[in-house]
Amino acid sequence: MHRSGFVNIIGRPNAGKSTLMNGLVGERMSIITAKPQTTRHRIFGIVTAEDYQIVFSDTPGAIEEPHYKMQEMMNRYVNSSFEDADVMIYLVDPLEEYAEDDMLVSKMRRAEFPLYLVFNKVDLVSNKVLNKQRKLFKHWIKPTKIFEISALSGDGVPDLLAAIVETLPEGPKYFPDDQLTDRSERFFVSEIIREQILEQYHQEIPYSVEIDIESFEETETKDGLELARITALIYVSRKTQKPIMIGKGGQAIKKLGMNARKRMEDFLQRRVYLELHVKVKEDWRDDEGALKRFGYER
């Protein structure tokens, strides 16, 4: 019997969803930083074995009170994951406070699919706190199974994966054996740039930028090595942010380009020539046309 299905990972911003999916898939499918609201899109990661295929879905963190149209669209990705789930993973950070009327808790209460309640970061929390959270959530929702893991270290992740395989319904393969994701290299290149911006810049800057890959050309070096020539536009939402992105004498964007290029070469497994340019698109987070161009209605 061949099993297959969609396993969607839901949780608050910075609960560790991307870290968990990367651990389950075995590839760096989603960008990971210490900052919340890192993931903005819904990303599939595909695991194929002889007798099963799992399509994992990493979603943006659910935002209780969105302030921009961009955040409203991010919440739409969260809502869409309730429509096609064969198994739902509700990832909880036990160090945070939750309430019975939280948006996700309310949605999970009405779930009609196998629901795995997964407590993450358990290596950082006491048994007393964990037991309290477990008791609360068991009262609020009716999980099919409960797991305690550390997505960062990998503890408990193999047991979670084994349980998912057992729960999947009988079904065909949805994707070819060698396909790891539904996203293109251009998408991951833009995510790498955004990851490095999140790491390098502070305050509002990382949340005010969007990346547009203007060109992605496959060519060769003089020595015959594979080379990707990439030109990327970094859009900021206010004029005052452009000089901050560039930095004094261009030092900030030079550092950004160097770090992003190194990550791209690791990911693409070839040499990269990267050009970065900064443009102003005022209030793009509330501009439906700009959001569509940036792929938020995908």
Image (spheres, helix red, strand yellow):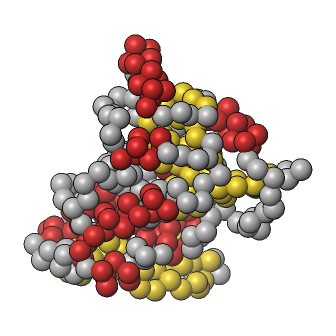
Which residue sits at x=35%, y=29%? 95
In the rendered structure, the answer to whether residue 224 lies left or right of residue 109 reads: right
45 versus 233 height, above or below: above
Query: Is any part of residue 211 visible from this angle?
Result: yes
In the rendered structure, the answer to whether residue 44 lies left or right of residue 189 reads: right
78 versus 103 height, above or below: below
Which residue sits at x=41%, y=64%? 76
Q: Report the residue that reaches farthest toward the right.
A: 1
Quadrant for residue 238, please give it. Answer: bottom left
Which residue sits at x=62%, y=64%? 181
90 versus 213 height, above or below: above
Residue 212 spot, x, y in % from top left: 38, 79
In the rendered structure, the answer to whether residue 134 lies left or right of residue 157 reads: left
* Viewer-proximal residue among 197 and 250: 197
Residue 166 spot, x, y in % from top left: 76, 40
* Viewer-proximal residue among 165 and 202: 165
Q: Report the residue that reaches farthest toward the top.
A: 128
Badge count: 0
Which residue sits at x=45%, y=21%? 135
Query: Is any part of residue 153 visible from this angle?
Result: no
* Viewer-proximal residue among 139 and 230: 139
Residue 105 spot, x, y in % from top left: 41, 41
Residue 29 spot, x, y in % from top left: 55, 58
* Viewer-proximal residue among 179 and 67: 67
